[in-house]
Amino acid sequence: MNNIDEQIRHALNSEEQAMMGDPGDGLRIDQLILSPFRSRNWFITAIAMVYTLVFLGLAIFCAVRFFDASETKILLAWGFGFSFCMLAVSMLKMWFWMEMQRIAVTREVKRVQLLSARLLHELHAVRGEKEPG
């Protein structure tokens, strides 16, 4: 942890520290991979995974046909097909990893919101004010 993390840790009481957890403790990789399937857009993620597998299968098919081809023109066509399919797989995988990152960042923002709400509640309690809303 860096210096600011230590300062935040020392400013929190033990109950808040337990609620916040370890800042370095995020989701495990298996939880991160499954998190897009548990989100609101799980159906889109499932479709993207199916397309990823389809394009991977097509890429393997194009690669096999590429090595079986004897003419240059056919060789170029299968090579282009393989390149296109691998590009599609790469783009879908990048989207999936960005979706996992979005979920992880949202989780951390919610933790900060929870701590801010608790701090605001305690501030109003110390001042003896009625909470707004």
Image: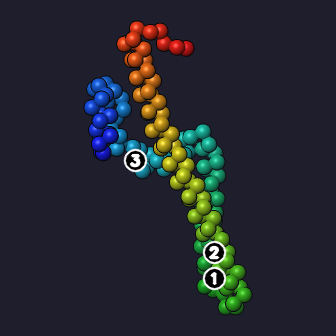
To which residue does mark 3 refer?
A: 28
Residue 60 lies left or right of residue 27; in this view the side is right
Residue 82: which disc? 2
Q: Which residue is mark 1?
A: 66
User: Which quarter of the rendered picture does the C terminus lie within?
Assistant: top right
Identify the residue shown where x is 36% and y is 29%: 19
Q: Is residue 107 visible?
A: yes
Where disc 3 sits, the SS reads: loop
Instruction: Determine the CA span between mark 2 and mark 3.
Output: 33 Å
Q: Which amino acid type corresponds to the residue marked 2 in the rendered image?
A: Phe
Viewer-proximal residue among 28 and 120: 120
Q: Are marks 2 and 1 in contact (CB under 8 Å)?
A: yes
Sequence order check, earlier mark of 2 and 1: 1
- Establish if 126 lies above or below 81: above
Q: CA distance from mark 2 to mark 1?
A: 8 Å
- For label 3, count other residues whose C-alpha is less than 10 Å away and answer few (under 14), some (14-19) or many (20+): few
